[in-house]
Image (tube, grey):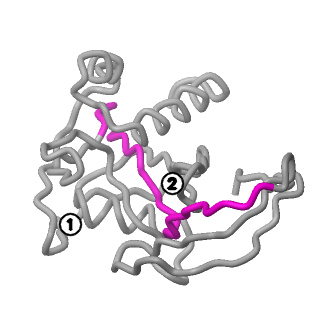
Amino acid sequence: MGRPMMASRGWKKLSTDIVAETPLFTMKRERVVNPRNDHEFDAYVIDLSDWVNVIAITPEREMVFVRQYRHGISRDTLEIPGGVIDPGEDAVAAAVRELLEETGYSSERVQHIGTVDAQPAIQNNALHTYLVIDAEPTAELAQDHGEDLRVELHPLDSLDELVRTGEISHSMMLTAFHWLTLYFRKNGSI
């Protein structure tokens, strides 16, 4: 799904140990050998499920956002809906589910517009971005016990300003918006 496999260029993995397990991720220590100089060292990898994020646009050309508290930075952020792909779930189903759970919005018009490695220096998961056109409210929010989400609609043409002013600062959102820009360049407007 848009994630080409590249050669390892001779890197050798000698062993893997689990350092920590949490409900969200597993931290692994991998003993590796650098092919350039045969130097052995420990590399740390965070093992995570793939994620989805969803750019949902209403018939009125408004984007559906969620405002939520993020513990890593101890403040609220403005984001598009998204989350973890559950075991056995495909990415498009996860995108539809996350949009509905976090915002109450849905649509039949869902398409994949891009995939990136989330943070390849230390993580092994991918982020899949979906575009949902003609999203409309169809259900109540189904928030997890640890979520406090607020749905906000912003005009599509305000996106640049939201980024420029820092209202949107989450790197995964900026990646999604780049995929949206590429989509518009290829397909024109929605």
Report if residue 42 lies within the magenta region.
yes
- In the image, residue 76 sits, relative to residue 105, either above or below, namely above
Q: Say whether residue 133 is left or right of residue 162.
A: right
The amino acid marked with disc number 2 is Val
Relative to 186, 78 lies left or right: left
Neighbor class of circle 2 (other Cα within 10 Å; few <14, some 14-19, many 20+) is: many
In the displayed structure image, the side of residue 108 where residue 23 appears, left or right: left
Residue sitting at x 55%, y 35%: 179
Q: Which residues are magenta?
A: 39-63
| Label 2–label 1 contact, CB within 8 A | no
SS for dot 2: strand
Q: Position of residue 98 (x, y in %)?
A: 35, 64
Camera-side residue: 33 or 135? 33
Q: Which residue is mark 1?
A: 139
Residue 12 lies, in percent from the top left, at: 81, 65
* Residue at 20 percent of width and 51 percent of height: 70
Residue 31 rendering spot, x and y as whole percentages: 67, 69
| Residue type beneath disc 1 | Ala
Question: Of callouts 2 and 1, which one flags the residue occurring earlier in the amino acid sequence?
Answer: 2
Q: Nearer the viewer, residue 150 or 156?
A: 150
